[in-house]
Image (cartoon, rainbow, N blue to C red):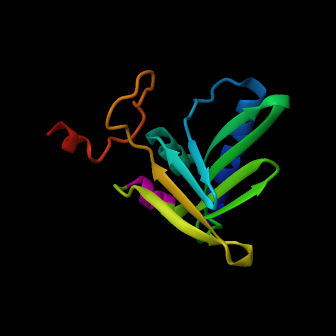
Amino acid sequence: MPAAARFMHSVQALIRDLMVDYKTRKGRRDLNLKLRILDNSIRLRLTRPEVDKVRQDGLVRGRVRFAGSNTFEYILESSPATVKPEAHISSNVLTVRIPVADIERWADSEQVSISSEQMLDEGEQLRILVEKDFACLEPRPGESEADMFPHPDKDACRA
């Protein structure tokens, strides 16, 4: 698919998701995109359905609601216009963009993560890590891990 067509596909998926989410609140499958922020690092963890969604639709997102109708959204976008992973924040929305080729290679392989560093002002760096979410070695009560990737060390724990 040409880059322009992939970009339009991503925009159409975003518009469709926004319309479904804000107008009807129906038809949107709840996803569990996890975000961890620590100093100058951002880590996103994706379940299998989320990896499939970002590969197919070019976008997956999460949201935190706060009092006073405030929200913080975080988006992982597969972008044909991006040559290196990058992150931006604007109007309470954190967007992490990853090149389409990197997403496709990662999604279709045993590769665990996509990692990069983005140069910031004054010589600082932002570490970006996007990874597949693995099932815990020990199950946690009340948590479903059905959509998670099998843990690579699961057999070592049974020996």
The chief SS type of the magenta part is: helix
In the image: residue 99, left or right of residue 66: left
Q: Residue at the spot x=43%, y=53% of the render?
A: 107
Q: Residue at the spot x=44%, y=44% of the render?
A: 133
Does 100 appear above or below 29?
A: below
- Magenta segment: does it hold 91? no
In the image: residue 99, left or right of residue 143: right
Does 140 appear above or below 120?
A: above
- Magenta segment: does it hold 107? yes
Does 10 appear above or below 102?
A: above
Q: Residue furthest right?
A: 68
Q: Residue furthest bottom?
A: 123
Residue 30, horizontal then vertical, whole percent: 58, 30
Residue 76, horizontal then vertical, whole percent: 61, 51
In the image: residue 134, left or right of residue 12: left
Q: Which image quadrant for residue 69?
A: top right
In front here: 59 or 154? Answer: 154
In the image: residue 120, left or right of residue 50: right
Q: Which image quadrant for residue 1?
A: bottom right
The region drawn magenta spans 103-108
Residue 132, horizontal then vertical, whole percent: 44, 48
Number of on-image labels: 0
Q: Quadrant of the C terminus?
A: top left
In front here: 79 or 149? Answer: 149
In front here: 38 or 47? Answer: 38
Q: Residue furthest front?
A: 39
Q: Residue at the spot x=53%, y=43% of the render?
A: 53
In front here: 90 or 109? Answer: 90
Residue 33, horizontal then vertical, whole percent: 56, 41
Q: Residue at the spot x=39%, y=30% of the render?
A: 146
